[in-house]
Image: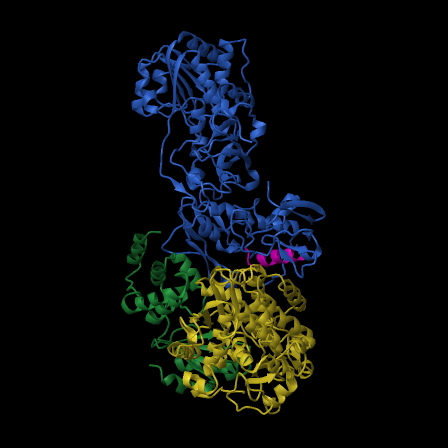
Chain colours: A green, B blue, C yellow
Amino acid sequence: MSAAGHAGAHAASGVHEPVFVAAVLAKLEALFPKYPTKQACLLPALWMVQEARGWISPQAMAEVGEVLGLTPAYVRGVVSFYTMYYQHPMGRHVVQVCTTSPCHLCGSSDVLKALLEATQCGELGATSPDGRFTVIEVECLGACGFATPVMIGNDFHDSVAPDRVPELLRGYA
Amino acid sequence: MSAELVSLTIDGLSVSVPKGTSLIEAAKQAGVLVPHYCYHPSLPSPAVCRMCLVEVEKAPKLMPACVTTVAEGQVVHTGSDQARKARESVLEFLLINHPLDCPICDQAGECELQDYVFQEGRAATRYSDYAKRYNPVEDFGPDILYVANRCILCTRCVRFMDDVAETPVLNVSERGDRAFIGIDPSQTLDHPWAGNVVDLCPVGSLVSKDFLHKARAWDLDKTASICPGCTQGCNIMIDTRDDVVVRLRPRPNLDVNRHFICDTGRADYRWMNRGDRIEAPLVRDGDRLVATDWPTALERLAAILRQASGQVVILASGRASTESLGLVHQMAQRAGQVTAAIRVPTGPVAPLAGIPGLSLRSERVPNLDGARLADCAADWHAALSAVPGADLVVVLDAELDPNEAALLSQASRVLVLGTVDEEWIASVAALVLPVTTMAEENGTWVNCNQRVQRYTQARSSAGMARPAWWVASEALALLEPSGTWPDTSADAFVALGAWIPALAGLTYAELGLTGRELAAAGTGARE
Amino acid sequence: MGYPHPSHPRETVVLSRHFGDAPARTYAGWIERGGYVALRKALGMTPDAIIEELKASGLRGRGGAGFPTGLKWSFMPKNDGKPHYLVCNADESEPGTFKDREIMRWTPHALIEGCAIGAYAIGAETCYIYIRGEFTEPLRIMTAAVEEAYAAGALGANAFGSGKRIDIILHRGAGAYICGEETALMNSLEGKRGNPRIKPPFPAQAGLFGMPTTINNVETLAAVPHILNQGCEWYKGLCLSNPKSTGTKLFSVCGQIQKPGNYEVTMGFPMKDLIHDLAGGMRPGRTLKAVIPGGSSVPIMTRDEAEGALCDYEGIIEKGSMLGSAGFIVLDDSADVVYEVYRLAKFYAHESCAQCTQCREGTAWTTKILERILRGEGQTEDLGLLLDLSENMTGKTICVLSDSCAAPIVSGIAKFRGEFDAYLSGARQPTLVGA
């Protein structure tokens, strides 16, 4: 796979603004000395893409591959393994609700229902008409003693009850 | 063998194998095939299909035979109740999402899922009333389709591309039961050795477009042969259906091509089925060539050889067997001073990165080194320049371009030992004798590493065609009735030993079907 | 202490002493609370002496397997000329478990100190802390603490002037339960899919980046400074039962309980008291039905088993389950065991890495069967089928994810068969609707 091949692919599927330029590139390069391989920087690099773009497009995967010396297919295989990397555009704020057993026992189904209503997402995985939210179910958030935990973007909210939902969402434009 | 040996018992049979051998390979030594999917001797073992679980006495649980190495005194049971139940359950799990579309699947009949389920799977499914996983068929590359629904995720294809081709274009995408083999949309499976993933796939998930719906596996006849595509000499199997070649596949030879062939070789078989063949001996009658029988033709050949005395030029095909080159050269010597050459087309080199020494070679003929041994490797252009004024030119199945063919009219006599009826033949040949292609005869070639390898007859010969060595042998018998001349390919090979020291003492039996590397010329076969 | 609840008098607070105490998060605050004394002490000891101290303490891995920590460290080769790695497993994602999160949120320096001691003891210059992707707050706090520790000279090229290099690098996961399995974690850290690896080779021979590696859980490493400070005899003495289980342990109690939270008690504490006293017991009008004690990957305990069990590695095995990561999922009499077993199976099906056949297909198939039962469409043979599939999913795969899926199914059917039968017979209304 040649570099020229990548460039061609980019042109064919729309413009891709490179993520790894200036400060972001510097941030990634600062990680290289911390690991014996560049490949080990794949998860951090993908986080940088997602922080910049909100999701990880095929073009971005190719770009990450180029920066780290990996093929796009390899990067895609890794991206698709981890549920926190989004392969499709999401709402501005991704709302993750834990519905695994401990939280289910404590009423997470009602919290989920309240979130789907209040965000107007309607169903799991759908983005609200205003583009603000996407609500997804998540397996165990590791805060079972604080049921129901809800993550909005990078913010962790403990002990969310259905009646707290509208207020909680107010902070996210 | 200097490796330390370890003795163990597998299914009651004692075997001794080198230290570090896997149980699955040790079992092969005991004649026991442990069913498996992900394991492949030419790929790293991930131990993921869990099909090869066997019972090892004193181990707390079943062990994967592919990654468990032998230990002294180990007692292994591959057919215990526990091992059988584990295999039966793997088969059941593999089948729940399998479409069972065997009637339309190319792999049926040579499918390891089908075979093992037939052997020890459950008679009926317990996965009732649930929908099966569905993914569309994907076009992976120029010759490869991915039928995801049949996939058992053994990952052989991914590992081949990652670790052998060293071109990671495939991946396992997603996880859990949503997983499938993925390819980046900007990439295609067009690596020069990519076709091997079709052979590696134990089920009908990766299929060849070229072979798609061409034949049922059980209708195929399989013949051990050698790839005629280049000087590498990859061992192949020629698959024919009703005497028509429909597929070439790699035949394992750990010393030459392991389990692989390149796509160029794989695709290079259509010429074996050409219909425009010379089917009978043709003798010149004025300005015409007329068909005749072999006795008449051979008498005419002997007469030509008796008449000629001077310069003889042999223009041969690089696919000609060493036997044919040797005997035709002997025959030509009866007519004068011989200059013999083969035509050597060249092309780009395509190495298989993970297997050192394995490559599609630049010289696209299988027997360059055999020609050298048989003194038939003069410079092609030098041989051509000797054609004008030559007393006799023997064209042994060589493809000539129009300019080269035009030179033939300047030779005194032209003898054609040919396969395909070329346009120039009618105007210049004194005698045309139909010979067989490599698919229609037995013979040997010598690869670029001085390995002599046999290929065997895969289909019947066209019309009255005979191997070129036989034609030469018959002619020599007419010229020198007191001599002994070979009448089988095996004898022809033995006869070569008299003229080619490197081959002295070798027989077909000794070569077997995986060949033998020659020592430096003149010192005989290497032990 | 049971943050967010105040400490209960029957707790033995060692690791959790400063939970809820925000100033403890800073380097200065940690020093004030006696922090980094153990690391200084350790750097003056030989690695072998540290390992012997740990062996004598009886500390066992707190991530779930309970392997003796000192012994694990002693497996690391000596003077082999290769880089060694310490990896801290902070990928806490076992349903029911939330102790490592609190350690990182409140006492980040305790973990840093434990990691630094561990790295020194096993001859590693680098320690990677792999923090699960969802733990954004612990990651933020740990990041600040690591920066402070470098600034204070506790970490870096010359840790506390010892001439030893100790680097700690935080690495964020991205959403995969299986990365809590140590070999999957190593693959993930290397930038690969989080597929568990075949053992052997074991990490101490060829682990992260193919080098000798030790992987320890957060709680295990956080306990190490205390052992060095107070001595192995003290730690060994923290035991109410089996001498093979020593020290204090954080028990995460959650589910249908009055006061969910982390409770730190000594090994061998009665489970009955932990649930009914420390964690406040059942909600009004409810009675205890069952406990899944090890996080979700272990057999379900009935009320009688749970109330009769002592909380240590041996005590819970004796009552038919396993301590695991000690996340107690409490079910009261309103809980639907069939649904909870289904929900756990769905969890494992979602998290299966897809490598091994039994796990990839089995977790999904058992989920479908349980779903059908909950829809009121179960067949009488479904329970036998579930049990047979569970057997086929146990002890057959590279890691134990599929075993973990099978454990609640098998124990659920064995101990709460009536609830399954009620769905099958129609005595109970379907819980799930539609396909």
Q: Which residues are magenta?
A: B84-98
Whether the magenta-drawn stretch holds residue B94 is answered as: yes
Q: Report x, y in % for residue C387.
A: 66, 67
Query: With respect to residue B254, does B460 lie above or below?
Result: above
Residue C98: tell me if it is visible. no
Q: Quadrant of residue B350?
A: top left
**What residue is shown at x 37% (from left), y 71% (from top)?**
A90
Q: Report x, y in % for residue C286.
A: 62, 89
Whether the magenta-drawn stretch holds residue C54 is answered as: no
The answer to whether B98 appears left or right of A61 in the picture is right
In the image as oriented, which residue stretches furthest toward the top?
B307
Q: How many marks?
A: 0
Q: Quadrant of residue C60?
A: bottom right
The rendered magenta stretch, by its main secondary structure, is classed as: helix
Residue B263: tell me if it is visible. yes
Quarter that holds the C terminus of chain B = top right
